Amino acid sequence: MSENTEKRMVAGTGYEVIHAIILGDREVIIAEDMTAHNSQYYMKAEYRKNDIIGEYSNIIYDSDYNNIMQEFLESLHSQLSLVKELIYISDYQPDIITPAQCYPDDYSQNIEGKVVALKPSVLRPEYRRGDNQLVYIMHGGGAKENPKSTSIFCCHINDGTTAKYERHQIQGIIKELPYWADAQLDFYKIEYEPTIPESTQEEKVGDYKIIMCLQVGNTKFVLGENPKAPAPYATWQQHEGRSGYDLGHYLTDRDVAVKDLNRRAGNARVNLSADMSKEQKDFQKAR
């Protein structure tokens, strides 16, 4: 490290960060302080930052660097497993969307309500996939024609998560929507936040309280929470006319559970759209 490079310290400690890898929603670090009390020279921690503050968690100290490196690698492995799980439950299109598949972004045009592809370089390597590139532009000063600011607020079509980007990070307006994205677009044209209908507000599935609900056609998908359970979150489905819920997916991470809820509803929307398209074609043939 150059003498002119500013040291990165773990806030409120004497530990200097010497290794750091970002993977998924957090950064795993190793830090050292060779003057630490009780010879606890090394620290492994996980750092996560939201829009307001950052926090360290899962902190471990040791006098042996090899032990800390082992903890570091295990944390990375856990994060990698989580990232792969998140990708699996919204796995629509791994192939990267190229500029040739987009109309160039014309800054003289308002792009609110448009579906655009982000530049692959905007996304971290683990998320560089076509299904992560496609976003629906909701609002933002940067989305206006001849914008004076740059921020745009978007909804990722593959899983419904919202994010903020900059206008210059857009590759272009998608020329032809992939089938899976077209099937979900109407659903995401509103700034959707899963809610709980009044009829469901006090409902439970076993010991799980329902905290989110999505309706697709004649099927309802719900997310339940039970903080005391080994798997605190679970998703189920319920077909109209049937009592109770079935096909439960039990999960330990809230973000994964929300994405699983969106994936199940998204797949149902794709299937519903396909059925409607087939019925329309059959009707046209019969005429």
Image (cartoon, rainbow, N blue to C red):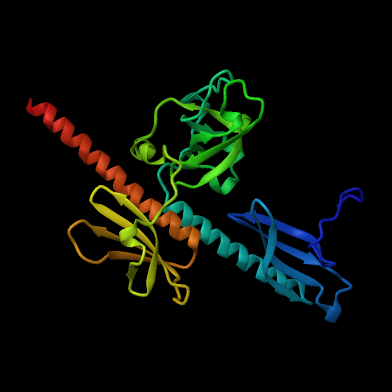
**Closer to the camera, 208 or 73?**
208
The reply, left or right, for residue 89 in relation to residue 99 is left
Q: For residue 14, which quarter of the picture?
A: bottom right
**Residue pictured at 33% horizontal, 67% vertical:** 203
Residue 257 percent location from the top left of the image = 44, 60
Q: Is residue 191 above or below residue 15?
A: above
Name the residue nearer the viewer: 203 or 56: 203
Q: Is residue 162 above or below residue 9?
A: above
The residue furthest right is 3
Q: Which of the 4 image quarters holds residue 74? A: bottom right
Q: Quadrant of residue 124?
A: top right
Farthest-out residue, bottom = 38
Instruction: Give the x, y percent position of residue 237.
Output: 29, 59
Residue beneath the point at 39% across and 68% down: 209
Q: Is residue 66 left or right of residue 258?
A: right
Q: The C terminus lies in which quarter of the figure?
A: top left
Direction left: furthest residue: 286
Compared to residue 12, the image places residue 217 above or below, namely above
Percent position of residue 275, x then y: 21, 41
Q: Residue at x 30, y 60 (%)?
A: 199
Q: Position of residue 65 (x, y in %)?
A: 76, 71
Q: Is residue 275 left or right of residue 235?
A: left
Seen from this angle, which residue lies furthest front?
Answer: 198
Give the number of callouts: 0
For the residue pair 93 and 166, the one nearer the viewer reads as: 166
Residue located 40% across and 44% down the image: 92
